[in-house]
Amino acid sequence: MSNGQKEQTGAELAAEIARRRGRSYPAHEFIAKTFPDYMKVLIELDEVIRARPRLYDEKMHELFHIIALAVEMSNPPNQPHLRQHLKKGLKLGLKPEEIAEALMVCVNPCGMKVLTYGVTCMLEAMEELKAEAAAGAAS
């Protein structure tokens, strides 16, 4: 940060990471408020990885997140996190077939559980998107 910029507070950093992620995670809020210097570095890393022009667009970055989280699927608390990335990827234009095919590629090195878990979470994410759209239309 240059000398002319003010240092962000933990609350501001928590709000920034929530804006970038599309939702607020309690763990991010805790880290931002407790270790703002660490969260600042994570936001800077996010800037390097996602915000600058790269070979892959945001849609592909979401696909990579989906694959990584599906491969790591043995941790059920990650399921909402995976669904959040699936919903973002679908909103960005990823097709269910593209996601399923990418998950199928993981079967050989990672096992069938990746495909089953990933597609199950994708179907749940699609249902959540439908419910959110219906709720938005009703209000």
Image (cartoon, rainbow, N blue to C red):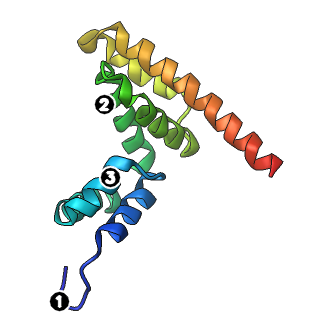
**Residue under numbered circle 3:** 28
Q: Is residue 86 visible?
A: yes
Q: Is residue 120 left or right of residue 113?
A: right
- Above or below, 98 against 115 in this view is below
Q: Residue at x 30, y 18 (%)?
A: 74
Circle 3: residue type: His
| Residue corresponding to mark 1 | 3
The number of discs equals 3
Q: Amino acid at mark 1?
A: Asn
The x and y percentages for residue 100 are: 47, 21
Label placed on residue 65: none
Query: In the displayed structure, does residue 5 sit left or right of residue 63?
Result: left
Secondary element at tag 2:
helix
Left or right: where does residue 54 sit relative to residue 137? left
Labelled disc at residue 68: 2
From where the camera sits, is residue 56 visible? Answer: no
Above or below, 22 against 37 in this view is above
Q: Can you give x and y, in whole percent of width and height, for residue 45 in the image?
A: 22, 58
Mark pair 1, 3: CA separation: 26 Å
43 to 103, vertically: above or below: below
Task: Identify the secondary structure beneath mark 3.
Answer: helix
Secondary structure, mark 1, is loop
Q: x, y (%) of residue 68?
A: 30, 30
**For the residues carrying marks 3 and 2, which lies nearer the camera in this image?**
3
Hey, which residue is sitting farthest right in the picture? Answer: 138
